[in-house]
Image (cartoon, rainbow, N blue to C red):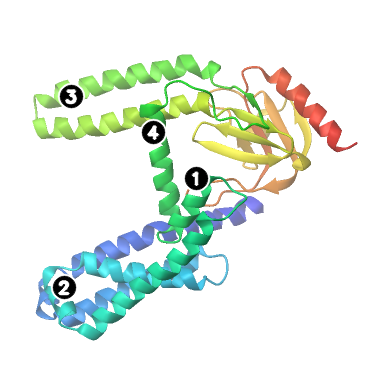
């Protein structure tokens, strides 16, 4: 039942993310047609209405309850900015000749900026979270949070791929790290070699047919190669962590799930394939069979970049040396019940 309900939420979240882009793009194409050029004021008003209505409907669909007033103001400001940026020169000229409409749009944008600046300053000066989280929260006041999280993830991958070659892993002072990257090293090296060969073959073959196509595909392949390098390196820099009150199950940039110790009822090293493949199981083992499973006494929501996922009742993952982890976790769990 939980999986079915969450599937509906996932579909709604995906539709609320993709549909506005399609509708706004179609509206932008419509205002560039001859009928729109013949009636620019009507086309401008219709364009503004379509964009504002689309963003508001997307906001309502993404919100679990009543949207916040700041989010409503942000959606209207985004609609005003999108209309100005996406309008052809004819419609922009009509907008400048209609000062009331232009002033209303400017007032909405300035109001959003002022309100977001006040909320962002409180987020930056807040306590209880790390510096990166504070700046992400501040940027989310100006831009859609999903866009901010996506931009942060992209920059993190690129930074790790290009600049992080040596140094310690991401392990807080109160945590114990457990590696899982050693069994992935041969497969990761193979992927890198195959990717390098693929880039060279694309460049050589397409270069005889179209130099432009070869350059475009070469750039895209290089970007993919950088992302692959960043992902592979993240396996070492982001190990599984055991803290005094939680287990942080990580798989590079792909998975980062916090499991409180009070939610764990059992730690097992043997389990069935049906349990691993069950939708209520978060399988964090990559390219291998998991050797540890955490059974939970309550469902935990998965962390995701853009959308909600089904709650999990079990967390499975693989460690290079699982015995020390299981001994320490059993001891921590025993200490909690004393």
Label at residue 259: none
Residue 204 on image: x %, y %:
15, 21
Q: In this rendering, is residue 113 above or below 217?
A: below
- For numbered disc 1, what is the local secondary structure? helix
In the drawing, does residue 103 fall left or right of residue 55? Answer: left
Label at residue 203: 3
Mark 4 and mark 2: span between their CA atoms?
39 Å
Q: Look at mark 1 in the image and give the residue it sits on.
A: 132
The residue depicted at 22 percent of the width and 32 percent of the height is: 219
Q: In this rendering, is residue 23 above or below 181?
A: below
- Tell us which disc is closer to us: 3 or 2: 2
Asked if the residue under mark 2 is in contact with the one under mark 1, i.e. CB atoms within 8 Å, the reply is no
Mark 1 and mark 2: span between their CA atoms?
39 Å
Residue 132 on image: x %, y %:
50, 45
Badge 3 or badge 2: first in the primary sequence: 2
Mark 4 and mark 1: span between their CA atoms?
14 Å
- For numbered disc 3, what is the local secondary structure? helix
Label at residue 159: 4
The residue depicted at 11 percent of the width and 75 percent of the height is: 37
Determine crowd level at label 2: few under 14, some 14-19, many 20+ residues with C-alpha closer than 10 A.
Answer: some
**Any part of residue 130 in sight:** yes
């Amino acid at each position: 039942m939980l999986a079915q309900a969450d599937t509906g939420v996932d579909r709604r979240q995906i539709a609320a993310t993709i549909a506005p882009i399609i509708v706004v793009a179609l509206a932008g194409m419509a205002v560039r047609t001859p009928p729109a050029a013949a009636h620019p004021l009507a086309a401008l008003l219709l364009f503004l209405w379509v964009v504002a209505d689309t963003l508001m409907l997307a906001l309502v669909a993404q919100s679990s309850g009543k949207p916040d007033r700041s989010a409503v103001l942000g959606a209207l400001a985004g609609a005003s900015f999108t209309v100005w940026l996406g309008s052809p020169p004819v419609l922009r000229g009509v907008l400048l000749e209609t000062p009331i409409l232009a002033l209303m749009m400017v007032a909405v944008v300035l109001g959003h900026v002022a309100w977001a600046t006040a909320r962002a300053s409180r987020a930056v000066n807040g306590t209880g979270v790390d510096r990166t989280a504070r700046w992400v929260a501040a940027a989310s006041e100006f831009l859609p949070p999903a866009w901010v999280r996506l931009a942060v993830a992209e920059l993190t991958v690129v930074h790790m791929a290009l600049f992080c070659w040596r140094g310690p892993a991401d392990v807080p002072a109160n945590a114990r790290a457990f590696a899982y990257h050693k069994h992935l090293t041969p497969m990761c090296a193979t992927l890198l070699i195959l990717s390098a060969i693929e880039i060279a073959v694309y460049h050589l073959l397409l270069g005889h047919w179209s130099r432009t196509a070869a350059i475009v595909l070469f750039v895209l392949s290089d970007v993919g190669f950088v992302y692959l390098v960043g992902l592979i390196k993240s396996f070492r820099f982001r190990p599984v962590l055991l803290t005094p009150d939680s287990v942080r199950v990580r798989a590079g940039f792909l998975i980062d799930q916090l499991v409180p110790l009070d939610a764990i009822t059992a730690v097992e090293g043997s389990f069935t394939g049906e349990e691993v493949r069950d939708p209520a199981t978060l399988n964090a083992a990559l390219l291998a069979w998991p050797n540890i499973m955490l059974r939970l006494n309550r469902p935990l929501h998965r962390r995701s970049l853009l959308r909600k996922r089904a709650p999990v009742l079990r967390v499975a993952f693989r460690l290079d040396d699982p015995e020390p982890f299981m001994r320490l976790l059993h001891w921590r769990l025993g200490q909690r019940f004393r």
